[in-house]
Structure formats: structure tokens, C-alpha cells
Image: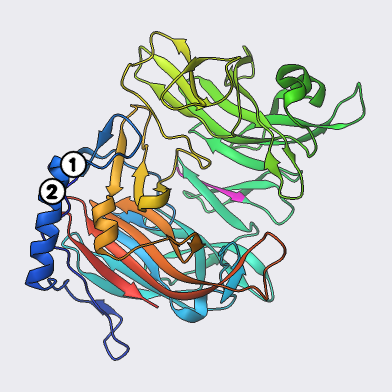
Amino acid sequence: MGNSGYAIGAILSALLLTAGEQRNRIQAAESVPEEVQESAAATAEETQENAVDYGVSPLSCDLSDLPPMKNEIYAVWEDKIYFRQYSDEDIEDGALWADFSPAPDTEKELMCMEPDGSVVQVGTDHGCGSMFIVDARIYSQSLSKENGYRVYSCALDGSDRVTYQAEQALAVESGWIICGTDRDGLSCIDTRTGQERFLTDAYARFLGADGERVFFYGYQVNDETGTDELTLYSADYEGNVSVLRMFTREEYIDIVGDAYIYQYAMTIQNFMIVGDTLYFSVGSYNGNAKMYSGGPIYSMRRDGSGCKVETVSYDQFFYLYDDGGNSVIYYRGNEAYGESVGDEPGRCVTLYGEAPPDVVPWLSYAGYDEPCIQGAIDAILFYPDTSGVCYVLLSQEESEALAIGTYVDGNYVQRISDIEYAGGRLFFTVTDLTYNPNESIGWRDSYDRGRSVCYCKDLDSGNIRILYEY
């Protein structure tokens, strides 16, 4: 079914877990009633004739050749997928914008999915958030009332735990775990030796890394003006830090002109490493809502040389198309830069070669390096690489069959989160929301958390089941 355009799987299966069932073993999914199967098949046949307009091009519903993604929640080791099974007490009950934080000092079930799709509990841990596996050890962070966040490593069953000084595990690269420290600095853990090395104790925001260097931004005093200015750094894994370039507010204002507002300190939000070249956006925020004011998109060589303004964008996020012979940046901007693409204000600027005639990315307020939920139809789309192909991970029809509806009559009623795929399976969680006016602060809406359902979709068959719920 993955090769049949927008068709959904012929069977939508669901596994319903009751309180009395053994939660350390998740059984095979059960088929939905026959009449629902017939309805789904009819919808799939109709969809082939009337394709949904997702507003992007080219589009692929064939997930058999889906490029890999960087996983932070579902970690793969030796063809097995490890993840935490959460319960109601593990997550706070309410939050602004439904951005629920983990609860401290709670124990979770550590689960393992076998290649055949069966799931078994292998242990327990007190971790939360991102989880990486290197050489059969889990690297993550825990939260306690006494110590706050702390990075740790453990065996695949949660035993043999080692705690580090860092607060958050940010990424894994070439045997190194890159971490954020309690002083907003950066450190790294050598997974071969277990040694933790501090890269910087100064304020630093991690951007990306490869096998040689870690890239981050911070702020450094401008000797000419005496003001703190945005500065891009890199460091090797021995802790040797290099200043790549400073970006002053005067430069920002000269580039963007009076049409953009500078109020808060500039940041780097979108950062890409492509061969020896870095691509990134620089911009400021303004107002109580801290809305992005726009700013330039730069390119430079990884040693800091050859820095160039490629264009100016309304948003901090952009999409880079690169097939080796042609390279194009897609973004939202005005007519002063680039060429029009699709609906206004979609623009593109060609770095070298030619712009492909069929590539029209979505105009997103979120990064292209993670799956995006497409507004009104609650489909999940993703650009996993620079090929220009947008993949439909969850179609509108599949979303409707699961009764997913993030917005009803303009009200935010469901949240889709923790979207990742690994081992030929897509995982995502749908949480019911209730608006709470008593906890809302002005325009910042607060929501109470309801039922959460974690789904698993087989990318080959299209079948969807419930892994667990709480």
C-alpha cells in the first residue's frame, strides 16, 4: 500500500490496552471491524482519483525508500527499537501552549520492540526526553527535585547507571555525546572511555556537529562598541574553541534595513552542515511575544572564511535543496531577494547550478529537519534530506481514520508530538487537550492534559496500531 499514492492501508488495526492487562508485554494488533475496513478501502480508492493537495511538490507517499532520520526518542540498536513507556504521573497535568514538562523522580518502563513488531519490557529507568544508544549503552537525562536534570548512561535494561555533570544529552556524533551543562555551557562524553570533557563554560547554544567539530553560538564583547554581540564558534572534541565570526547589530541593520525590527539579542535558529559549507539564519526578535523579525541567511566555509549573505528571510527557517550539481535555498521573503516560488511570499535563491522546476516546499514556521503537522488536515509531512522530496508520513485519510483533529472550530483540542520513525515504523503520540482559562496568561493559552495515545505505523503495510496509552 506504500506505493499506491495517497491510499491508506487496507487494514487499520488497533491494540487497546486495559488497566488489567500485563503492560510488560504488548500483544499483536487486532483488526478493526470489517465494515471499517471496507470504508477505509473505499476512501483509499477514492483518494487515488482525487489526490489531496498538500501544497508541496514533489510529494511521495512511498515510504519504502525513506531516508533515515536522527532519532531522539526511539533509539535503535542491533535492529531493535528501545523507548520509554510513559504513564500519567510521568508528565505534568497542565502547561502554557500545551508544552508539558516531565515530572521529577518518576520511574518509567523501558521497552524494546523486536524486528517482528512484538514489544517486551526489558527494565526500568528514571530518564526523560532525548535518548541515544552507543555501543549497547543508553545515554539520556533524568530529572529529580534534589539534583535537577543530570545526564546518565546505563545498560539497555536500565542497570549499571553512571551519572555525569552535564544536564542534557543534545546529540550523538561519531562516538561522542554532546551535552548541555548546568551553566548553559557545552560538554561532550567520549562513549569509548566514559570521560566527560567540557567544551565551554560560557553561554552556548548547540547548533550541530560532525566527526571533527561542534558548532555553537554565544555572545562576545565587541571591542569597538563594548556591547555583547552574537558570535559563531566551533570546537574540537579536545575542547579547543575557535571563533568563526561575530555578527554585530550594526551589520544586521545595514542588511535588513528599516523594515525589520531589532529589539532582543540576535540568535541563530536554522543551521546546516553540507560538506565544507555552513548555512544558517541570523535574526532578532521583538515584542512581548518575541516574534521573529527576520534576518539574513548566510553561508560560510567551516573554518569561518568566505562568509556571504545569500538572502534575507522573514522566517528563521529555510529549506536547502542540494543534489550535488544544483543548490537552492527556499524561504519566505520579499521581492528584494530571489525569485518567486509557488504562492507568495515563497522565494528561492540559486547558489549554483539551476533551480529544479518542480520543487515547491511548504512555507513553514517550524524547522524542515523535523516532521511537520500540516494544519487543517492533520497530515504529517517531512523533508528528511536535501533531495527536495517531501514524504507523507501520515496522510489526511489515515489521520481521519484515527479521529485525529488538532483544531475544532478554531480551538486547540489535540496535540501530536514525539514523531519519529525507525526500523520501518512510524511512531507518534496524540494527546487530548482542554483549554484552561484560569491558568492562561493573557494571549498565552494554558491547557490541561487528557488522554495520550502512542501509535505505531508499519511503513510497509500501512497498518497502524496503538502501542500504549495513558
Q: Quadrant of residue 296?
A: top right
Picture coordinates of residue 212 (x, y %)? 52, 30
Taking the spot 92% from the left edge, 24% from the top edge, the residue there is 225
Q: Which residues are magenta?
A: 175-179
Residue 1 showing in the rendered view: no
Picture coordinates of residue 313 (x, y %)? 59, 26
The disc labelled 1 sits on which kind of residue? Asn
Q: Quadrant of the C terminus?
A: bottom left
Picture coordinates of residue 259 (x, y %)? 73, 25
Please rate how many residues cluster around mark 1, counting C-alpha atoms within 10 Å: few if below 14, some from 14 to 19, many from 20: few
In this picture the colour scheme is rainbow
Taking the spot 36% from the left edge, 70% from the top edge, the residue there is 453
Against 114, is 423 above or below? above
**In the rendered image, which residue does mark 1 sit on?**
50
**In the rendered image, which residue does mark 2 sit on?**
46
Against 355, is 443 above or below? below
User: Under tag 2, what secondary structure?
Assistant: helix
Q: Give yes or no for contact between labels 1 and 2 (Cβ–Cβ under 8 Å).
A: yes
User: Under tag 1, what secondary structure?
Assistant: loop
